[in-house]
Image (spheres, grey):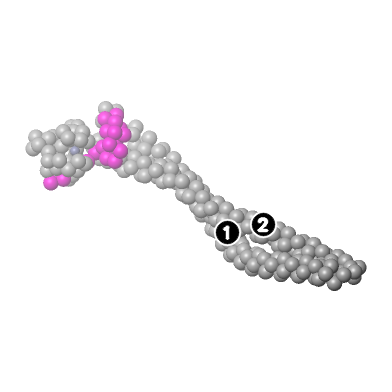
């Protein structure tokens, strides 16, 4: 194997390590994203439950008010039995009518509140169902992502070990040049000459450089991007 051939194998490993490392960085973000949606829906459920609590309290308040007003009517009726004049009697009658009107208004209010509570209960049931379904699916996703992360990490260590072995067999000068360019470029350090152009930056290469690139014992850099050029046989 020529040094270029060895470097090409090494580059393939380096590219896979780089891709897989990028994948590992995306996994926590993906987990956060699915958890965030769950939190959002949980908040909607909590809000609906809070609203139901408030409505139930309002219903109790209205019921208490109705009860109080009914007791008041009872007292007014008792009072009616003790009055001496018709005027006093009629005055109490009018007061009773006013209280009865208040009770009817409160009863209307209670009906509206009960309808509101019913709507909230239906909504809560739906939100609750959706939330527990989502919770299950998020748990499954998280588990799958954790498994994937574990598998990727294993694969990376395997590739790194392999890469270390491969690197040992490569001339140190070539290796350090290759590593510097790979790190700097982020994609390829070693590129083929393609129809007279650099396979990395696609600029036209001077004929002399193409001749140099054909020699496998010679390091030839693209004069534009600096990547190492090789001649594909
Ligand atoms: Zn180039």
Q: What element carries label 2?
A: helix
Image position of 142 (left or right of 59): left
Q: How many labels does the image show?
A: 2
Q: Which residue corresponds to the image point at 37% horizontal and 44% vertical from the top-left?
A: 19
Looking at the picture, how far across and down is residue 118, in whole percent?
Answer: 64, 67
Mark 1 neighbour density, 10 Å: few (under 14) some (14–19) many (20 or more): some
Which label was assigned to residue 67? none
Q: Quadrant of residue 128?
A: bottom right
Residue situated in front as seen by the camera: 166 or 66: 66
Q: State yes or no: Cβ of the residue under disc 2 lies below 8 Å from any atom of ligand 1.
A: no
Q: Which residue corresponds to the image point at 75% horizontal and 61% vertical from the top-left?
A: 65
Looking at the picture, how far across and down is residue 166, in whole percent?
Answer: 34, 37
Image position of 195 (left or right of 182): left
Instruction: Write the start and end of the magenta stretch as one range.
Output: 176-195
Residue situated in front as seen by the camera: 164 or 102: 102
Q: State yes or no: Cβ of the residue under disc 1 lies below 8 Å from any atom of ligand 1.
A: no
Residue, disc 2 = 54
Looking at the picture, how far across and down is residue 38, in whole percent?
Answer: 54, 54
Residue 49 included in the magenta stretch of the image: no
Q: Which residue corresponds to the image point at 17% horizontal and 43% vertical from the top-left?
A: 202
Q: Which residue corresponds to the image point at 13% horizontal and 46% vertical from the top-left?
A: 195
Q: Is mark 1 on a helix, strand or loop?
A: helix
Q: Quadrant of residue 122?
A: bottom right
For the C terminus, which image quadrant?
Answer: top left
Image position of 210 (left or right of 76): left
C-alpha distance separating marks 1 and 2:
22 Å
Residue, disc 1 = 131
Looking at the picture, how far across and down is residue 121, in whole percent?
Answer: 64, 65
Image position of 100 (left or right of 172): right
């Amino acid at each position: 194997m020529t040094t270029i051939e060895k470097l090409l194998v090494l580059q393939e490993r380096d590219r896979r390590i780089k891709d897989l490392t990028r994948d590992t960085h995306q996994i926590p973000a993906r987990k956060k994203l699915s958890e965030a949606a769950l939190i959002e829906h949980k908040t909607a459920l909590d809000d609906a439950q809070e609203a139901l609590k408030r409505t139930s309290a309002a219903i109790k308040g209205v019921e208490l008010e109705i009860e109080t007003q009914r007791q008041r009517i009872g007292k007014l009726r008792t009072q009616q039995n003790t009055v001496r004049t018709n005027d006093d009697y009629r005055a109490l009658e009018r007061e009773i009518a006013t209280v009865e009107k208040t009770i009817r208004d409160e009863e209307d209010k209670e009906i509206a509140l009960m309808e509101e509570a019913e709507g909230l209960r239906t909504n809560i049931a739906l939100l609750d169902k959706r939330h527990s379904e989502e919770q299950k699916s998020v748990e499954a996703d998280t588990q799958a992502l954790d498994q994937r992360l574990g598998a990727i990490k294993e694969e990376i260590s395997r590739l790194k070990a392999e890469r270390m072995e491969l690197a040992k067999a490569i001339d140190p000068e070539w290796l350090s040049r290759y590593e510097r360019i790979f790190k700097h470029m982020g994609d390829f350090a070693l590129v083929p000459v393609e129809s007279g152009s650099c396979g990395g930056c696609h600029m036209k290469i001077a004929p002399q450089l193409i001749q140099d690139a054909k020699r496998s014992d010679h390091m030839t850099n693209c004069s534009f991007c600096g990547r190492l050029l090789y001649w594909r046989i």
